[in-house]
Image (spheres, rainbow, N blue to C red):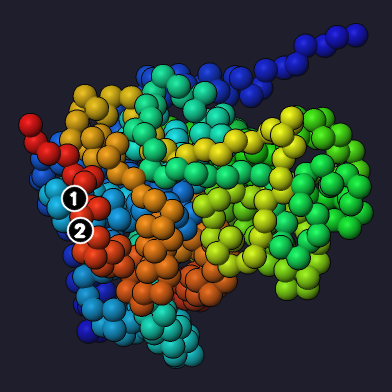
Amino acid sequence: MNIPKIPVGQLFEHLINWLTDHAELFFDAVSGTVTAMLSGLEFVLLLPHPLLMIVFMSALAWWLASRNIALFSVLGLYLIYNMGYWTETMETLSLVLAAVLISLALGIPLGIWAAKKDLAERIIRPVLDVMQTLPAFVYLIPAVLFFKLGPVPGVIATMIFSLPPVVRLTNLGIRQVPEEIHEAAISFGSNPRQLLFKAELPVALPSIMAGVNQTIMLALSMVVISGMIGAGGLGNEVLKGITQLKIDLGFEAGISIVILAIYLDRVTQHLGQK
Amino acid sequence: MKLKHAVAGMMTAAAAAVLTGCNPDATDPAKEANLVYPNWAEGVAYTHLAKVVLEDKMGYEVEITAADVAPGYTAVAQGSQDAFMECWPALHKDYLDRYSDDLKSLGNVYEGTEVGLAVPAYVTIDTIAELQANAAKFDGKITGVDAGAGMMKTIENELFPAYGLTDIKLLASSGPAMTAALADAVKNEEWIVVTAWRPHWMFGRWDLKFLKQDADKPIWESGNLEIVGRADLEADKPELAQFLKNFFVTDAQISDLMVKIKDSDDDTLTAARQWMLENESTVEKWIPTAN
């Protein structure tokens, strides 16, 4: 018995090569958009003096979350500034924000669509499974082929990894809207649009916000991996630390990531509860 | 309420910045250089040096990007980056073969690299031939680096059969894990054998020695570090290509530069600039003269 090997890997390789040859305009357009987003975010985040930015970010935490989280923000962010990783942290933050914004722009509509149409859900679900479980290292090279080195492929790789939870939880949130609310909205004469925006989305909001929160956390966990394709920021500092066994550098940059993660987690966690 | 206004203000500013894309640089494209380097101490050091020389002395706009080896070569072969700064011909054979049409060597940047198996100086064997008999003292393993690295294949496919090493296994890990294992072994004065190459900072930190090869079974030769450019770099940016060809550091120079960077409180670029100012005569030789 000699069963020929199914050329799964080759198929993917051909697909990638075909895409690099024929879809260049599309990738350039995506690349241009992401670059503009990134440089805009970076410009804004690095414009104020770090201390002013710390005050602003802490105030935001107080306003959106609580006083304790604001206190943590002041101390944590000041520690980052004090250790000398402010620029890298803001670079990382803009990378994460860009990836998350794109994820939400694509993910929430997809989630709504999946909640409305069972067929859509059946198609989207396995795709999400692949996106979440295929080791991120595998698509680093395609990302470089399509989007060159730098923060852009970093944003794309991060987006692929962090998109699924917001789709899943938006889908789930809308599907769990109680039937009574549905019926009430319809009996008051809502059209499908009003039903979605006035009834379903508000009820599903906590679930959607949980998805947003998960998306942000996953995006942060990609920071170091995207450092391998030249995305810079804190990921690069961590890699520099570990490839040269500079434990201090690795830890300082790592702790900066943790502080950023806790900040974003706590602040976004409270968004849905407001 | 004021806070909400502040937030709204920031949002508007962000939106405006995002829309305009803020990209004010409009330099001559021939005076731009995009260099990729892997995050290894020696490459970090001289790549930053190349950046300050190109910028301060030759009026270039230089973007240096730290990336892993495979994406680094891919980006240069694709033409989106100008040069990969730290090519180890022996270790990176796989990439060089794969992209042979799209890459072109720009000559050596360092000469006298060594590759092989290394042990701490207190280990009492000196040659690879002694490994088999002492396998148990090394716990039956060679601590290696990344599974895909060229030297890992060489060890399994060439070294093992040539020296009849059957009692010792090659353990794939990663560069950082290998050096961490080495650090731990040295601290406890345990026997360890690792895959090693020089220049590497581990030789500066610990007293290590390469295990000698038998004269009739040479596996590794001494080699050089090269800079590899994209195939059409010389046609596009002849001056940059010439600079990278001229660019060369001796062992003493790279060690001095690495120490400067390590000891400096300033960032790597500032330390590299300092080194440049102290070594004007060397630096001048790299700059192509217009003719």
**1 and 2 marks in contact (CB < 8 Å):** yes
Label ID, residue A69: none
At x 68%, y 33%, the residue is: B219
Tell which subunit mark 1 falls on.
B
**For the residue labelled by badge 1, is the local secondary structure a helix, a strand or a loop?**
helix
Label ID, residue B284: 1
Residue B255, position as x, y percentages in the image = 43, 61
Q: Is residue B216 above or below residue B179?
A: above
For this view, does A46 lie left or right of residue B148? left
Residue A85, position as x, y percentages in the image = 39, 73
Tag 2 residue: B280
Residue closer to the observer: A33 or B174: B174
Residue closer to the observer: B167 or A255: B167
In the rendered view of the protein, which quadrant contains the C terminus of chain A? bottom left
At x 56%, y 39%, the residue is: B222
Q: Is residue B48 above or below residue A193?
A: below
Residue A28, position as x, y percentages in the image = 30, 33
Q: Amino acid at mark 1?
A: Glu
Q: Amino acid at mark 2?
A: Glu
Q: Are marks 1 and 2 on the same chain?
A: yes
For this view, does B122 lie left or right of residue A28? right
Residue closer to the observer: A58 or A151: A151
At x 51%, y 34%, the residue is: B89
Report whether residue B14 is seen: no
**For the residue labelled by badge 2, is the local secondary structure a helix, a strand or a loop?**
helix
For this view, does A25 lie left or right of residue A188? left
Report whether residue B238 is seen: yes
Tell which subunit mark 2 falls on.
B
For this view, does B233 lie left or right of residue A265? left
- In terms of image quadrants, where is residue A92? bottom left
